[in-house]
Image (tube, rainbow, N blue to C red):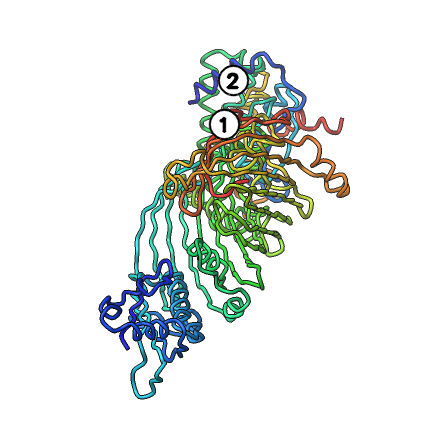
Amino acid sequence: MGTVHAKSLDPLPMHGRDLGLHPDDLVEPPEPEQESKQEILENKDVVVQHVNVQGLGRTKEDLLGYEISDVFHAKNLIDVMKKSHIARQRLLRLGIFKEVEVLIDTSEGSDALPNGLDVTFEVTEVKRLTGSYNTMVGNNEGSMVLGLKLPNMFGRAEKLTFQFSYGTKETSYGLSFFKPQPGHFERKYVKECSPPALGNNASTDLQCWLNCVLCFSLTLNMYKVTGQFPWSSLKETDRGASAEFNFPLGMTNHTLKWEGVWRELGCLARSASFAVREESGHSLKSALSHTMSIDSRNSAIFPNRGALLRINQELAGYTGGDASFLKEDFELQLNRRLFWDSVLSASLWGGMLCPIGAQPSCIADRFYLGGPTSVRGFGMYSIGPQSEGDYLGGEAYWAGGLHLYTPLPFRPGKGGFGDLFRTHFFLNAGNLCNLNYGEGPRAHLQKLAECIRWSYGAGIVLRLGNIARLELNYCVPMGVQSGDRICDGVQFGAGIRFL
Amino acid sequence: AGLHRVFDLFTSTAAEPWPESATLYQPLKEDQILLSDCASSLAVQAYLRMCGLPVQVVCKANAEYMSPSGKIPFIHVGNQVVSELGPIVQFTKAKGNSLSDSLEDVQRAEMKAYMELVNNMLLTAELYIQWCDDATAAEISRPRYSSPYSWPLSKILAYQKQWEVRRKMNAVGWGGKTLEQVYEDVSQCCQALSQRLGTQPYFFNKQPTELDALVFGHLFTILTTRLTSTELAERIKSYSNLLSFCRRIEQTYFEDKSS
């Protein structure tokens, strides 16, 4: 019947021409045969008899079972191609293959059915050891990162990473072991939510759906991180270890984590305030935390639609250590597309820290507010309780933002570079304070509602990859309280998480 | 850097009077503080009492890390934070309080020399006994030093401090000494002090100076601190004029609580 050779399907083809059929097959035979060929391709039922994976070295086969098993359920040729494409993406997402090629052929052999197909995935495994060098932009800081990675260490997509980062504010190193566990849930999830329809947004929809496909995983970390915080005149060195277990539950993703950190705090300058000097010294924090997140956005940076809800709680002190507190914080983001490609985005953050026992909270655990990634128009983390110009953070806060994103006026560079930019108009508000836990919740709400800081403005946002953003805004801060440091006028910000 | 700091003190603090809220910080008295830190703290307290400057003593577990130089004790006066006896003497001088103004230059040089002797001999001996003597380190120093912290941080900090002090002892040449040699050095130091003191009430004239405060701080602490052996205290007790010197200062400056 001829070989249908499907390679690198991006986007999925709808016409026979893209399948790479030899043009002679279509031109030479008389008309009626051509029609019957087309009928075979699109309508005839097929049965996938074998799905093979070739080129496995150290990878264990049982790992791949979940990724490729769905191909067996394909009913016709187009379906086979769709499911093979999805399986290919999933195999690539494991991070253990450099290349995956899909070969769809008719079955051969003694048990071959007339409408049987064999699908073969030809894979090339990644090298055992890879090194990398990156420069990284975090929240208003830059750093150089050297990495060593051992992907697929024991054959089941385990990953051992060592990273050394040297930056303007921070030096750190860390060792991390990640073990994913393909689970039964994936099949359930695939049945409940159908693969995306093919259309203009085929690739982004596919990406979105793949992002929703979660997995169990276990991550072990060991690290040493130093940081400098000039807004508090504080420097902090953390040496710690953590174990994290990630699992999905229905539509949500849960993470359970234990973290043990040896924290060393010190004054950044001799002129640090006495309140910060009193926090100097060593402490040990041993905390259990749980995070639940639901993310239905179609992109992390410029989402057109969808919502994000992340709720995190942390309990320290019951597994040892000096620090003892209960900390809650949440993040909510809603996006909606409006007229003319503009997007309205609303976000709300909040958190509370309750120290357990007699000792007061530590400056390293408290919340901070303000800056180009938080309430714009104010200095970096420069809102709220302070002593002699050093900001001490607060035990409770809330922050909200309302944004209107539009493409650049007159759309220069449309379809290419121009798509990385957006203009945005924003309204930010927030408040940060310490709570006296003797008073009731009503008094707390009242305290958080008085003296609200807010700001409005407009600016340009640039997307970096799929993770980070650069912003250049003109801000007008309002509701400024005495002690806050403002940054009115032009403010530049770079980071990963913005209000 | 030292000169710059003194200049800072002169220009910014000369005008302000000594506030009522002046505070002295040291590690926790009952469970944490060690012999050497207690001696240094007592010396500063004695000096301030001799000057008639009131100061409140506050005990904090992280006092050593709060201190700008990493040494105990330090005082918080107004906006200033000053640590160790030497800089504190300079600081009070800038505010117009000094005990050694009436001394002649020769006497002042002699005073400085004896203070150096106490720092190099007595203080170093205290550090040696605390951290280089295995019995004392295991029974007293490490448990006390790490008492505010939980495991495993307590172990890490205690051993880190021990390692740091032992390295310093090697650097000043005390690494190879035995405990007996250290006791001998202490005896010789006490002999020199005893000879200088003679039958006088204080080391210079009839008024106390910072040298008196320093000597009192160290000797009184050694006499009243429980160690694994009483050898050190015995060596000092053999100099009776030093004993009466300590008692005299204690009665004059530290027993006002009862009155």
Q: Is residue A98 above or below residue B141?
A: below
Give the Cα separation between the discs numbered 2 and 1. 14 Å
Q: Residue at x 41, y 51 (%)?
A: A174
Give percent across and percent down for residue A469: 45, 40
Residue B216 in sight here:
no
**Label 1: element kind:** loop
Q: Are marks 2 and 1 on the same chain?
A: no
Instruction: Tell which residue pokes out farthest to the front in this image.
Output: A31
Asked if marks 2 and 1 touch (Cβ < 8 Å), the reply is: no
Tag on residue B109? none
Say which of A226 and B120 sits in front: A226
Amino acid at the residue labelled 2: Leu
Displayed quadrant of residue B203? top right
Q: Residue at x 51, y 14 (%)?
A: B10
Residue A471 in sight here:
yes
Tag on residue B9? 2
Say which of B76 and A325 sits in front: A325
Q: Is residue A390 above or below residue A312?
A: above
Q: Is residue A136 left or right of residue A54?
A: right
**What residue sits right under mark 1 in the picture?**
A270
Say which of A117 and B211 sits in front: A117
Q: Is residue A121 left or right of residue A190?
A: left
Chain of the residue under the numbered disc 1 shown in the image: A
Q: Residues within 10 Å of mark 2 (few under 14, many from 20)?
A: many
Q: Residue at x 43, y 74 (%)?
A: A74
Give percent across and percent down for residue A422: 46, 38
Q: Residue at x 57, y 32 (%)?
A: A391
Front position among marks 2 and 1: 1
Chain of the residue under the numbered disc 2 shown in the image: B
